[in-house]
Image (cartoon, rainbow, N blue to C red):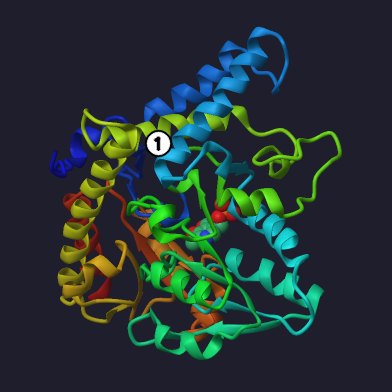
Amino acid sequence: MSTPLLDPIPLRAQFPALQRTVNGQSAVFLDGPGGTQSPESVIDAMAGYLKSGSSNLGGPFLTSQETDAAADHARAAMMDMLNARRPEEIVFGQNMTSLTFALSRAISRQWQAGDEIIVTQIDHDANISPWLLAAEDRGVTVRWLDFHPENCTLALESLADLLSDRTRLIAINYASNAVGTINDVARVVAMGHSVGALVYVDAVHYAPHGLIDVQALDCDFLVCSVYKFFGPHTGVLYGKYDLLDRLTAYKVRPASNMPPGKWETGTQSFESLSGVVAAVDYLAGLGGGGGTRREQIIRGMGAIKRYEGTLSERFLHKATRIPGLRVFGLTDVEELDKRTPTFAVSLDGYTPEALATLLGERGFFVWHGHYYAVAVMERLGLLDRGGLVRIGFVHYNTIEEMDKLFATLQELAGK
Ligand SMILES: Cc1ncc(COP(=O)(O)O)c(C=O)c1O
């Protein structure tokens, strides 16, 4: 079955929040990189769990057995979404940041003084600071992989020089939540493995935009957050089973010694796990019926990628016509497969905060500042100058919304 065409109009009817208005104008949600809206099916699944009776894991009675099943279903759903080998490779947690702090603490127990790790200038701080702090604790040297500021692509040509037989880990972003660049993670994994380093991938920004296949990437760990792909506020970690098994987790004594339980500290948000299943099923639904859920996800994410490509192409064409509007990152329409439809921009005459505020008053929801990608803004020399305005599209955004945005930018640029 070929990739289905995606029409956002009927899909939008499934998202109650997209029906909101601001000052009499339809709200335009261009804040997806900060968090997406949820379809009714996700909301119903979460409410359904709470309504039918919440409990905890492992009890010999109905609501506990249903809670066990909710957790199992969520694990199976994320296994399909990421193409993990087995459900035990999926770990849930509060969010990506908390999971990464937990893993960095566990992984770094094996490091020796004089070892080295690599972080990148293009990453969100949640995949930098946990590693910097662990390196400080263990006396480990941190090497930084730079990006080219002119188009915000990683300077992968310099990675070989940063690697050595002391490199223990590379922490790398799948796609930048600030400028939208998609990084060649498979190449980084192969290079890291060639010197025996582990590779930890932050797929939080990438997940709503493209298919993830942890087996094809061969990464050791990959993290994402379900609220960035139309679900609830829950973090997900994939880890190769033998690593999750071998590493020592910081855990309480009665908790399981086996993955995934040893990594899931305390009680999970089971209503969120119920929503995780619905979010994955929503993405699978975009792929049309037929085949396994993984096959549907492959087609669904293909449909998203194709549709978002048309949004990016239109955005980049239109952006050139607004005087004083500058787009940071990849702007070549021949390279659309190397970026998500997330655009960091500046407009002459406006601070990022002033522009975001004016847009917000007109119903366009956009973020400004550094969005925790502090290393990106630092490298671009914009950290002390208010960062940039981030205009982030996902598949529920329409051409009409984009055209309305550009009409407003044109009006503001003329002032
Ligand atoms: C690329 C990226 N990584 C990590 C995070 C942190 O995720 P969480 O909020 O789940 O901790 C974000 C959140 O914006 C992000 O965009």
**Among the 4 quarters of the image, the one containing residue 216:** bottom left
Residue 334 position (above or below residue 358):
below
Residue 37 visible in the picture: no
| Nearest the eye: 195 or 18 | 195
Q: Is residue 335 left or right of residue 225?
A: left
Q: Is residue 19 left or right of residue 190?
A: left
**Among the 4 quarters of the image, the one containing residue 186:** bottom left
Residue 194, horizontal then vertical, whole percent? 50, 76
Residue 209 position (above or below residue 391):
above
Quadrant holding the N terminus: top left
| Nearest the eye: 409 or 230 | 230
How would you rate the neighbour count of disc 1 (Cα within 10 Å): few for under 14, some for 14-19, many for 20 or more?
A: many
Residue located 47% across and 39% down the image? 78
Residue 37 position (above or below residue 211):
above
Which residue is the extreme one toward the top? 62
Say whether mark 1 is within 8 Å of ligand 1: no
Residue 256, horizontal then vertical, whole percent? 76, 35
Query: Quick one: SS at disc 1?
Result: helix
| Nearest the eye: 172 or 394 | 172
Residue 180, horizontal then vertical, whole percent? 36, 67
Residue 239, horizontal then vertical, whole percent? 57, 52
Q: Is residue 405 left or right of residue 123?
A: left
**Among the 4 quarters of the image, the one containing residue 390:** bottom left
Residue 302 position (above or below residue 322):
above
Quadrant holding the C terminus: bottom left
Q: Amino acid at mark 1?
A: Val
Residue located 56% across and 21% down the image? 69
Residue 334 visible in the picture: yes
Residue where numbered disc 1 is placed: 280
